[in-house]
Image: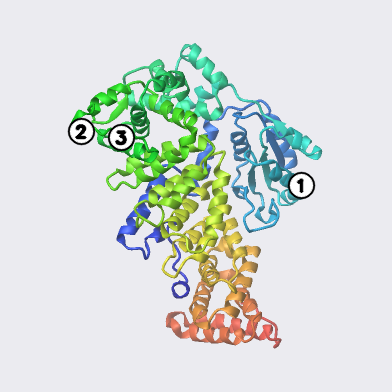
Amino acid sequence: MTERVAGHFGSYVHQAHAPLNSGDGPQYNFYVHEAVSRLATRVRTSLAIAEDDRHWLYQRFVYPSGFRRARSLLHDHGTVLIAGPPGSGRRAAALILLHELSDGAGNFHELPDTQDDTTDRALDTALIGEHDRMLLDLSSSDAERYNTVQAELSDFRSVVATRSARLVVVLPQQSDHLQRQDLHWLTTEIERPDGGRLLMRYLRQDGIRPDPADLATPQLTQYTADATMEDLAKLAGQIRRARDADGAAGDFRRWCDRAMAERADSRKPRVADFMAQLTGRQRALALSLAMFHGRDPAIVLRAANTLQDILGHPGDDRPRLDHTDLAAEFKAVEAGTGKDGGVRFRVLGYDAAIRAHFWTYFSDLRQQFRDWVRDCVTWHDLPQETRKELIGWFAEQCLASGRPQDLWWLAEQWAGRHAGRLLADISQALTEGLNHDGFGRAFRQRIYEWSLVAGLPRDLRQALVVVCSQVMAVRHPDQALVRLHHLARASGSGDDQAFEALLGLARKGGRLFRMLLGRLQPERWPTDAALLLAMAAVAVRTRGLFRSTAVRERLTAGWAAVLRHRPYEEWREPLADWLTAALATGPHLESLLDVVVDAAARAPGVLARLHTVARDWVPAVPAEAVERRTLFAALECRIDAAQGIEPPVPSL
């Protein structure tokens, strides 16, 4: 890999996922792109698009009580701490506070909520850039981390102020008794916005404008009074989908009734009574149908039989023709086959309620349910869309029941045994966890631990590259970069997907570029030497990067390590390419020459080799001979000065 980088110093201008094609063979490449495309339907895939997400939220945001004071504190003191009851929309309020400050200066980013290996401190001041807008979400943090962050917050805030940055902190629920006295004055509590107003705002953005009387029905009034902000947003989406399904037909009340029927809570009492009347075989069929809702009867039957086998449930030893036929079995569980051939429960919302019922009232069987999903996903003839839906519904239940480990256990089970065929499924299982508000941090931590393991199964490693670059990078780019860096270091010579994804992420923002430069240890890791050379190729051609003092200093240190510790054959051509790029930079040429001369001066004997590389570089392009000789003369003067030879370095 290092030789490939050295030979193509200026060629790293790719799309972030395009290099995932390299070196894996056409069949494996197909599975890689399947994984990426599946995730693309679920998440935004670039840091730039995150701004669109905030704008989307801004259009639907209802200002809660306490927001005006939060805005004032942020304006006057650069920091505000947001408290509030569960479901009040604290994170949304924090995002809007920072979004309102958008003026084109600085970066908008979320501070890491895991410490990883970048610092021993909970809050790393190196992550604060000039005029940055930063979010620190502690809503799912435990007491230990919350106390650690509070102890460091004063020092962190002083750097925030020095760099004219802004910081909004979302506090954990019920944290009053843990909060330090010196932070009370920066804290404001927001209250839950009016649910009816929020629902109306969402609906209007989707072109739905119901009459006030339509929103005043007892059922909807009670729901909007009690539901969380997230649940109201989901209800609005379900109403929109009901509208879209009806086309020109139907009206708001019809759409709303259908959407409310999809809320599982309204079906739970009836489902509990219904389940009590079923036999074991019928319960297996009901759960299978709930997990494969709308699918072919043969799939549902196979799933039910597989579930019974896993549970050790005795089968029916009678001849098959003596059994009840499948149509009758479906009728017994209040289901039937539609015109499209798919089987569904006759009562709307029954599938969600039955899934919730099994994970709640058969809690001792959750591990067997996990094993069942593992086996079903591996069926060769199970369509991709069906696998996707199955994993989504399983993730919903296992996360709701506090079992995130079930998802990463499945990822490990599916990896390394199916030649890449289940790469999209592994990626989806991890994505479901990463996108979960309560367990996202646990998944980021688990992925960090995986990234440190040598010899990970190939499919798991590839899935980690996909979810880090396509999912984690949207909200947590710093943490994605750390994990990709570890994966790149551990990659073999024929497995450079992590390397390419890491470069793609670093190119998306100057802050991330500087962060990766600061992490490199070319003297210890050959991969880091290759990364340094590749990043130098980007920096020397990007004015916004090489004009940065921090970037120049880190490039100098990185070049020095490469020149001192890596073979001459590795860096000879990249160094010549650096001179070629420097020739086109006009007024910044001097600073770029200073970088390589200062770097070479730190390694004994390298200044002479730098001179040789530059001398051989001059005649390589006859059409540029005059300009190259001028640059070479300036470089010679700098080399002499670095060796203590007078006269001083002239200007170009």
Residue 315 marker: 3
Percent across and percent down for residue 368 are 43, 40
* Residue kind at label 3, given as amino acid type: Gly
Percent across and percent down for residue 250 are 34, 18
Mark 1 / mark 3, whichever is N-terminal: 1
Mark 1 / mark 2, whichever is N-terminal: 1
Q: Is residue 107 visible?
A: yes
Q: For mark 1, does the 10 Å Cα neighbourhood hold few (<14), some (14 to 19), or many (20 or more) residues?
A: some
Q: Say which residue label 2 marks.
A: 319
At mark 2, the secondary structure is loop
At mark 3, the secondary structure is loop
577 and 160: which is toward the camera: 160
Q: Is residue 487 left or right of residue 596?
A: left
Question: Residue, x 55% and y 49% (percent of image)?
Answer: 444
Residue 346 marker: none
Percent across and percent down for residue 455 are 48, 63
Q: Is residue 78 left or right of residue 525?
A: right
* Distance CA(mark 1)–CA(mark 2): 71 Å
* Distance CA(mark 2)–CA(mark 3): 11 Å
Q: Nearer the viewer, mark 1 or mark 3?
A: 3
* Residue kind at label 2, given as amino acid type: Pro
Q: Quadrant of the N terminus?
A: bottom left
Question: Residue, x 35% and y 33% (percent of image)?
Answer: 288
Q: Say which residue label 1 marks.
A: 151
Question: Residue, x 66% and y 49% (percent of image)?
Answer: 131
* Distance CA(mark 1)–CA(mark 3): 61 Å
Percent across and percent down for residue 624 are 46, 79
* Residue kind at label 1, given as amino acid type: Ala
Q: Is residue 426 above or below residue 631?
A: above
Q: Is residue 265 above or below residue 424?
A: above
